[in-house]
Amino acid sequence: MAPSNIRFPSAEWCAAYKDAINANPAYQAAGTDWTHGPVSMVVTAEPAIGIAEDTAMWLDLHQGTCRDCRLVSRAEAENASFVIVASYARWKEVIRGLLDPTKGMMQNRLKLTKGHMPTMVKFVTASKELVASTSRVPTQFVDE
Amino acid sequence: MPPPMLRPQPHMPADVQLAPGAEENGLAMMLRDLVSQNLDAKPHKLGDFRALQGSVSIVADDADVALTMRFEAGGKLTIHDGIVGIPDVTIRGPSDAVLALSNMPLATRLGLPIPDPRDREAVKTVRTVMGAMREGKLHVYGMAFHLPMMMRLTKVMSVNG
């Protein structure tokens, strides 16, 4: 039986995302040396589609594994070492594999609002694999 | 009495700014953060930064983004949106290859960026850049005429070394 789609963003989606990251051997290889702390992915508020306030996924990443992924507020997300912010539409493109994260950042569609850019560049493959893992989560989008 | 000579001191932070109009250019913001944070973390690169003089344009074809970095002697970098003036060097290629240039292993004594075979990321980076050059996707125009500048730029921009 095909897995049912999980609403994005939600606590369930975060749990499935954690599993998807940990099931991705390419991420495990590329992120082996990652000891630079958690990463937050912030979805900006869009009341028209039911996202009343900024919502974030907090990823506790360490040496190629995801120790935790949970839904947090924007304020809590800002405590992460790296904060990436984008609109719902942009995250949707990322999850569907339609927007490459490197290209998205160069085009200012995805914004690194906090974090050490040289570290991001050094771990560009890990970042890509992290994002690629989103497409392995069967996702239901709230605007469809 | 004339004012004392203002010579950059080793502890002075690098002056890296976006020109008006570049605030919405994602690549410009990335490179501003990359250069300033790199110099903060690795002050031994400040000498090369302060010696840089000239302009370098970068075009990421697939992202439809371009910028120009203008270096002034003494340690000032201003990043402009688009191509401004006639750059000394122009780097043009796909976004992955453009970003990979900052992740290249620094040149060895042989003058070649040979990666440590145990460092899979470095090997992949060199393959990405060399592959893009071989396929004619990545071009560095003007490099032959500005080799010292390119060597300094590589050291300043590199997240390695």
Image (cartoon, rainbow, N blue to C red):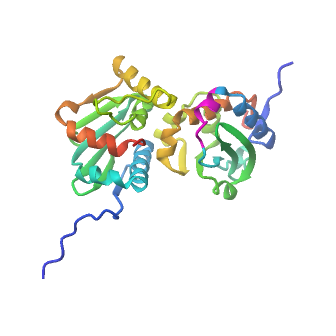
| Residue drawn at 43 percent across, 23 percent down | B127
Percent x, y of residue A23: 72, 28
Percent x, y of residue A58: 69, 47
**Start-end of magenta stretch:** A26-34
Which residue is nearer to you in this view: A71 or A98? A71
Residue B111 is a magenta residue: no
Query: Would you place residue A72 above or below residue A106 in this image?
Result: below
Q: Quadrant of residue B30?
A: top left
Q: Residue furthest right?
A: A1
Q: Residue furthest bottom?
A: B1
Q: Quadrant of residue B88?
A: top left
The reply, left or right, for residue B80 in relation to residue B147 is right
| Residue drawn at 24 percent across, 36 percent down | B89
Query: Would you place residue A14 above or below residue B125 in this image?
Result: below
Percent x, y of residue B36: 40, 53
Q: Quadrant of residue B75?
A: bottom left
User: Is residue B131 visible in the rendered structure shown here?
Assistant: yes
Percent x, y of residue B50: 26, 54
Location of the C terminus of chain A (image quadrant): top right
Which residue is nearer to you in this view: A136 or B10? B10
User: Is residue B18 visible in the rendered structure shown here?
Assistant: no
The reply, left or right, for residue A131 in relation to residue B147 is right
The reply, left or right, for residue A78 in relation to residue B140 is right
| Residue drawn at 28 percent across, 29 percent down | B110
Residue A28 is a magenta residue: yes
Which residue is nearer to you in this view: B12 or B69? B12
| Residue drawn at 59 percent across, 42 percent down | A34
Location of the N terminus of chain A (image quadrant): top right
